[in-house]
Amino acid sequence: MRGKLIASILILLQLNPLPLLSQGGVYVQIEPREPCIAGFPCKINISISNSDGTILLHKLKLITPWGAFVRDLGLREMRAGESLKVYVVVNVSIDSLEGPNFMRPELIYFVKGDIGMKSSQGNSSAILIQRSRIAVSLLSSPLSYQISLGEPLILEGSFRVDGIPSDFYPTLRVYVDGALAIEKEMNSSSGLFSIQVPLAKPGIHEVNLSLCYLIGCESKAFSVLVREAPKEQLSMELNSTKGYFQDLLNYYRTAVNDSIPIPGYVLSNISAIDSLIREAEAILSGNMTGDEQRVRDLLNRARGFISLSMKEITRAYKEALLSKLDNLRNELDSISKIDEKTYRNLSVSLDELEDRIASISPDNASKTYWDVTNRMEEMKKIVDSKRESLMSDIAKLSLVLITLLLISIVSITMLILRVWRGETGRG
């Protein structure tokens, strides 16, 4: 009964709003919307209309039971006869009274040509506020409660949050030994998830998984044991890293043979990688002192340098081709007025080549480089041919013009001689 009464009051207020306060021909009014939920931000749409001269919108203020909320409009220009919708985000207090709550908009603006600010107050409108009635479900557990050092802890599960605003999504946070390790905003109010959590040190770790929705959290706690990695596993990782390093060396040599300008620090990285791998190998073989954690750190650093160097060589391939492509595009512009059909076709081909350049990877860099280079050389020959044809046509036209000019000179000379002879004969 109480809910029906509140709804009836709200409908009457929206159909019969309080008198509108305005200055000049500028009007602001709150638009009806769905109920807001206490404790959550609420987006209030406000319509602005101007039937007067040109104005500059300065700020939009919304007076609410929970304070004033202001949005800067950046001196946006608004001409006579125009209308605009602007939203203001209101933080609805969690202690807000359930039912209609009144808000009043106020627009601060300047009139073009006048001095001083002006304001226009809109009607007080009621927005229905509902108390939060949230139901939360979080189901999750680690795939394994014991992992080896270097392996990620994998948390999988499902979540669901009912009763929150439709445009608000919960956040998943993972704490390791009290410190925030991962924070991920979900893209829906329910679904499945899989999260990899790095645990860098051996021992027992307290892991807390929290699903938070602004005014509360649902949590799950686990104890996870991280064991030292066995020596055999480290040996396998060493061999794997050496294989990646060999791939980098091959990639570097290929790029050098292709005359790709590679940044000098890539060679420095290669030297550093070699030193890191040699040290890790020496520790595992017993020729140097160091624990398993030191070996893992060395291999992780080596793999990081390998990944970075691979990316830099790939970037060098792309930049070399893009430089050639830009030069060819400039040459192509020179025939845009000569042969529009050829210009359009070659422009499309250049766009396709640019897409191929963007897809270059270490696996296809050299082949793509030469395929694209050869295709650009073919296109350059077409452009050069069109330009040479134009120059030939210009030369032929010049010859015709010179010939016509000579004929005109001879004809005029002969005419002058005839006239002169006629005058001499009469004399």
Image: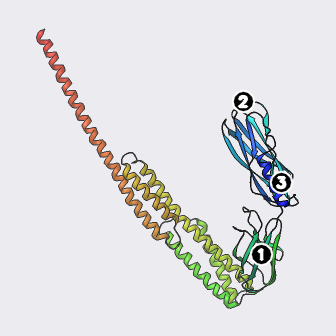
Residue plotted at (65% across, 74% down): 304
Residue 83 horizontal/vertical position (percent): 67, 42
Three-letter amino acid code at the position of disc 3: Pro
Q: Are discs 2 and 1 less than 8 Å apart at CB?
A: no
Query: Which quarter of the image is occupied by the C terminus?
Result: top left
Relative image position of residue 399 (x, y in whole percent):
25, 38
Circle 2: is it few (<14), some (14-19), or many (20+) Cα within 10 Å?
few
Q: CA distance from mark 1 to mark 3?
A: 31 Å
State the residue position of label 2: 113
**Pointer 1 residue:** 137
Q: Nearer the viewer, residue 72 or 401?
A: 72
Residue type pointed to by label 2: Gly
x and y, in percent, of residue 355 in the image: 49, 62
On screen, residue 262 versus residue 303, left or right, reads: left
Instruction: Give the CA distance from mark 2 to mark 1.
Output: 59 Å
Visual colour scheme:
rainbow
Between 305 and 56, the residue placed more toward the observer is 56
User: SS at mark 3?
Assistant: strand
What's the mark number on residue 100? Answer: 3
